Image (cartoon, rainbow, N blue to C red):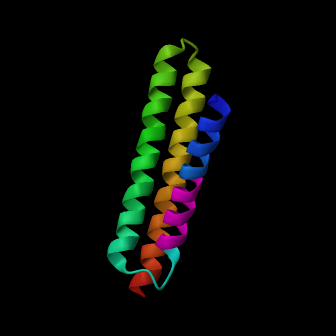
Amino acid sequence: MELLIELIVEFIFEGLLEGAIEGMGAKKVPMPLRILAAVVLFVLLIGVGVSFVFLGMSNDRVVFRVLLGVVFVGLLGGLTWKVCKVFRKRRQ
């Protein structure tokens, strides 16, 4: 039963992420929907960051906390770069 729930959640998140990333870069998608896709991605990233914080607080290892911080900063930097790239193309 846990495997089924995990597969369903993974399918939903994968579809949501792929749809948001593709929608953010598509020329035919209106700007308000692109902004909504960017907001959805940021909200999901903040959720991942909060889970990283809770994992770091539950574990006393400094290396684990640093690794989670680096992963989170990398994800945030990559998403920010993608959003800036998409919206910079739109302005030109």
- Residue under the image location 54 percent in, 11 percent down: 60
Q: Position of residue 88 (x, y in %)?
A: 43, 77
Q: Is residue 48 left or right of residue 11?
A: left
**Quadrant of the drawing holding the C terminus:** bottom left
Q: Is residue 10 left or right of residue 88?
A: right
**Does residue 74 sit above or below 23 in this rendering?**
above
In terms of image quadrants, where is residue 54?
top left
Number of numbered discs visible in the structure rendering? 0
**Does residue 76 sit above or below 19 in this rendering?**
above
> What residue occupies the far bottom of the structure in this picture?
92
59 inside magenta stretch: no
**Quadrant of the drawing holding the N terminus:** top right
**Does residue 16 sit above or below 30 in this rendering?**
above
Q: Which is the main secondary structure of the residues drawn in magenta?
A: helix
In terms of image quadrants, where is residue 70?
top right
Front one among 27 and 68: 27
- Residue under the image location 38 percent in, 81 percent down: 30
- Residue under the image location 54 percent in, 48 percent down: 75
Front one among 79 and 6: 6
Front one among 15 and 53: 15
**Does residue 72 sit above or below 80 in this rendering?**
above
Q: Position of residue 21 (x, y in %)?
A: 53, 65
19 inside magenta stretch: yes
- Residue under the image location 60 percent in, 50 percent down: 11
Front one among 29 and 59: 29
Q: Position of residue 18 (x, y in %)?
A: 57, 62
Point out the stretch of residues depicted in magenta. Answer: 14-24
